[in-house]
Image: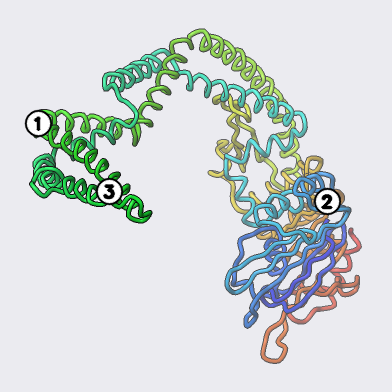
Amino acid sequence: MLSSLSLSNVALIKKQTIDFKSGFNCLLGQSGAGKSIVIDALSFSLGAKADKGLIRSGESALRVDAVFSDVGEEQKQLLQEWEIDCEDELIITRTLTQEGKSAVKINGFPATVKMLQQLAEKLVDFCGQHDSVGLLNANNHLAFLDKFVGVEVEKLKDEAAGLYDEIKEIEKKIFSLGGNEAERAREKEILEFQIQEIEEAHLELAEEEELKERFEFISASEKIFEKVSEVLNKLDGQRDNASALVYESKGDLSSFSNFKDIEECRARLENCYYELKDIVDVLESVRDNTDFDPRELERIDARLDLIKKLSRKYGKTVEDILDFQEQCKKKLDEIENSAEMLQKLNSQKQALEAKLYETCRVLSALRKKYAMIFEEQIAEQLDDLEMKGTYFKVDFAEGECTKKGSDIVKFMFSANKGQEIRDLHKTASGGELSRLLLAFKNVMLDNEMVQTVVFDEIDAGISGHTAGKLADKLVNISKFTQIICITHTPVVASKADEFLLVEKNVVGDSTVSTVTPLDEQQSVHEVARLLDGGETVSETAIEHAKKLFEGK
């Protein structure tokens, strides 16, 4: 349960620690005093949207610390999954700056808002005038019913979810093998075309680079022939060519072989001569093969275009294209040999679908059984809340088998006897929805996972004998779950176990809200103020308030 809530720079509250007790806690105070600030702060601490408007005027940041005691095993298990230490006390700290930066810590460990929201679902349930709108959403109705059924339905849903996941895995395998016969035939035809197109190209590794080089060579053949011929003439053609001059030079030095330096130079000239002769031979070969052949140029150009076309479809390089071809061959082989595997997978799928259908059937029967009990208990609660003659029904329709079963559930309601029963959202008024929500809470007492429920003016628009009945329902809930309630209804307030007064005062140049615990005499006085509705409290109102307290 919520033990305390510490607020720092939250709206009108400068600095305040509010202690809560088990049972029925009631927040009192005039409209605008700041009661909703307390609820907003608690909601913020549990992961609600960070609103900079909540920061006290003139301050750079706010902070809220929520302390929970007697933490349940389910909450501890979740914290253990996050590797956050927790004994019996849980401390949640959340801050927010004017720059919009929010930070969260759970028992001192950094956490995310998503983690906080997940934990909050197991800690506090907020029920206000607008929270009853959740009842209007038919998408929530199956969850409401399942929560009422409890463990039995969860076991069957787990079983259905397991079967559903298995079916989906088999469907993935079937799809990977080409799906149905028509899909496999289409896939096979595509693969065969791709393989054939690549095979007919007779690609070779490094072929593209060689072709490009050859293309460039042929394109420049005329210039190559001209320049190579000029070089050959200089090296070995004209009268005083390089080869002849080098040969003569080495001969001139041969008479001085007894001199070491001269002999080394002669030997080097001899090597140059033979190197020049080898160069001449290579260049002569190049010159003899530089005939410009436009047909070869066209052939190379066409070949390069083919490789480019294939690379756009199957891979950037020839190596990539050939790798793609191998993958296609493997896929084709799988498809051609998949008939037996597909037959086996389809048999497994049919068997699992039959099991899932049976599980959904049993799940539906269980829900329908409990739906009748649910209807009866809701009707009893509504009758107690002075909604006599109303009719509540859980309507079932059958859909596809999913992880949650095959049931499509929606709540039907008729506010008056003889009136046509219709979808809940089409017929229930705001006051009726508030009482419906309270009826749901009372019916769900044994199935509530949270230890704290916040009621924010759920009694709005309700008065007289009905307000007394509503108060009794809140008292009943408080026997099992901690309640924090904001109310302006005297009979509701009088049933509380603990009272907290929220007041707004001007201190200096600023307005400050404070929260003060009340003793019994003070509590009677504040309830009397609700009865009188003014600044002053009459003796008659005080006597009336005392009687309300005596009637607890």
- Which is more foreground, mark 2 or mark 3? 3
User: Looking at the image, which residue is at 74% across and 61% down?
Assistant: 105
Looking at this view, is 267 or 233 the one in front?
267
SS at mark 1 in the image: loop
Amino acid at circle 3: Ser
| Mark 2 or mark 3: whose residue is earlier in sequence | 3
Looking at this view, is 242 or 422 the one in front?
242
Circles 2 and 3, Cβ within 8 Å, touching? The answer is no
Amino acid at circle 1: Asp
Q: Residue furthest bottom?
A: 508
| Mark 1 or mark 3: whose residue is earlier in sequence | 3
Residue 107 higher or lower than 304, as above or below: below
Q: Disc 1 versus disc 2: distance between alpha carbons?
A: 97 Å
Residue 79 higher or lower than 142, as above or below: below
Circles 1 and 2, Cβ within 8 Å, touching? The answer is no
| Mark 1 or mark 2: whose residue is earlier in sequence | 1
Residue 193 higher or lower than 92, as above or below: above
Residue of label 3:
254
- Which is more foreground, mark 1 or mark 2? 1
User: Looking at the image, which residue is at 19% across and 40% down?
Assistant: 280
Residue of label 1:
293
SS at mark 3 in the image: helix
Residue 130, by quadrant, is bottom right
Circles 1 and 3, Cβ within 8 Å, touching? The answer is no
Q: Disc 2 versus disc 3: distance between alpha carbons?
A: 118 Å
Labelled disc at residue 481: 2
Measuring from the top left, give residue 384's x and y in whole percent: 76, 45
Measuring from the top left, give residue 134's x and y in whole percent: 61, 48
Looking at this view, is 259 or 248 the one in front?
259
Amino acid at circle 2: Thr
User: Looking at the image, which residue is at 72% across and 84% down?
Assistant: 505
Measuring from the top left, give residue 211's x and y in whole percent: 23, 33
